[in-house]
Amino acid sequence: MDKVLARGSGSSVARPRARTALATAVAGAAVIAGTVAVASSASAGTTLGASAAESGRYFGTAVAANKLSDSTYVGILNREFNMATPENEMKWDATEPSQGQFNYSNADRIVNHAQANGMRVRGHALAWHSQQPGWAQNLSGTALRQAMTNHVTQVATYYKGKIYAWDVVNEAFADGGTGARRDSNLQRTGNDWIEVAFRAARAADPGAKLCYNDYNTDGQNAKSNAVYAMVQDFKSRGVPIDCVGFQSHFNSASPVPSDYQANLQRFANLGVDVQITELDIEGSGTAQADNYNRVVRACLAVSRCTGITVWGIRDSDSWRASGTPLLFDGSGNKKAAYTSTLNALNGGGTTPPPTTAPPTTAPPTTAPPTTAPPTTPPPSGTGCTATLSNNQWQGGFVTNVTVRAGTNPVNGWAVTLTLPGGSIITNTWSAQPSGTSGTVTFRNVDYNRTIAAGQSTEFGFQGNGTAPTGTATCSAS
Ligand code: G3I
């Protein structure tokens, strides 16, 4: 499931690896954080940015400052995109190379280009364990905490009013089944470092949306469950958080999860926006195109999914160029993935139908069999089944439950199971539980009430103690 970064000297991080019409384009439109901007040269339905804007969303790309002198690159950027994320230029090592000495020159090149061309900017990233300047890597404890807080405050203040959304904290959770925080120098300053960073960012730029951003959180798993629990906790305690970014770096080892849309939706149900922040999908041809189409349709199906950013323009611009994961080839030509993405943004399905003529073979002339239909009733037609999948660690667990309809559609469901003595549920998603211990009934929430015949949906819960191991009963209405 894990993949190693393909390039970069200091980047051996293991990585896993998925109409409201707007006003017409306004050349040089002022960019105001929190409002919908319009790409200056985009026309509705024919470019990624304009098509996304038709539903109030944006379509962005990572931008590298050193490519702004490449005319092919800039031509595509200005034509297709209405959001820009500096790929590396706003990171801590770039903006504060020496403690207290800030350098915004490359980030400014991108922000200025974006503003001059009617694009908004996603800021990436204020606090991250990676790409720290050497001086910060060598700090710990209070000194590091103060340096981090100062960094967040200074950078967010410098860009105040120019940033649509900040990735305030990036990649703070560990991979694997523990749901634990990632160990890092920042984490070792105390578990509250994330909320301290969010509070500092809000104080510095109250107009920017504040996001938590991570990878391998694109489906429901222990890591995304832990992020979910953090967002739920922040919302309940008033820690300022407005959005969750799902990086969405996909390949054959880490494909688009089957519950991608449901996962976006469950976060949105917490009262935050969700954004696809670093999309790339390794592959080629129809398979790649179909995956892009699916990801875009998932975002469009979630009202709080406010936009999609791809992590680069041409395959050759990608951090993993050999996987040809982007929408334009190395020469800047549109790939099948581009067309399927645009189709999805314009409300269409996947790749165009085959152009080959249908087979002309005559239908068989033999008479259909005359055997009488079976008189036995259809098997288990009205019910549903619930299957548990547990992830247990010392002292805690996550249980995912697949609810599957029988041969009839389900219009409301309830799953009942019994927790072992002493086990307590601390967090449930995509279902409403009747309690937190003993025998608990989980009922559907609005968006997963109906299940087509033979199809399934998922919900889950996290708890302290031991996961349920017995059977779960499912009743359908
Ligand atoms: O610019 C220098 C160049 O002067 C030098 O010769 C060369 C030697 O290796 O390095 C160049 O810098 C590289 C930089 O990208 C620009 O290409 C760094 O080594 C390399 O580490 C850096 O990689 C970036 C990576 O983050 C670092 O973690 C990628 O461009 C960037 O796409 C990637 O983006 C991350 C997101 O921030 C967070 N999510 C995952 C995503 C992909 O890894």
Image (cartoon, grey):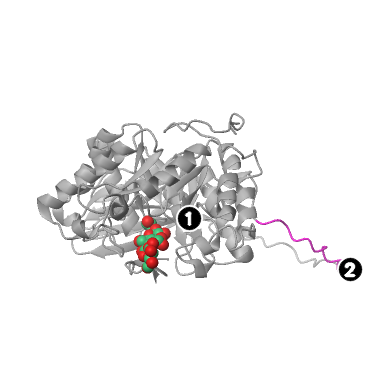
Q: Quadrant of ligand 1?
A: bottom left
Q: Is residue 301 visible?
A: no
- The outermost residue toward the left is 142
Our reading of the magenta stretch's main secondary structure is: loop
Residue under pointer 1:
279
Mark 2 against mark 1, which lies toward the viewer?
1
Query: What residue is at 50 percent from the left and 40 percent from the top?
Result: 119
Quadrant of residue 407 within the rendered picture: bottom right
Query: What residue is at 10 percent from the left and 50 percent from the top?
Result: 142
Give the amino acid type for the residue marked by disc 2 in the picture: Thr
Give the amino acid type for the residue marked by disc 1 in the picture: Leu
Query: Residue 108: x, y in percent?
Result: 40, 44
Query: Residue 424: x, y in percent?
Result: 21, 51
Q: Secondary structure at mark 2?
A: loop
Residue 90 appears left or right of 233: right
How many marks on residues?
Answer: 2
- The outermost residue toward the top is 23
Residue under pointer 2:
365
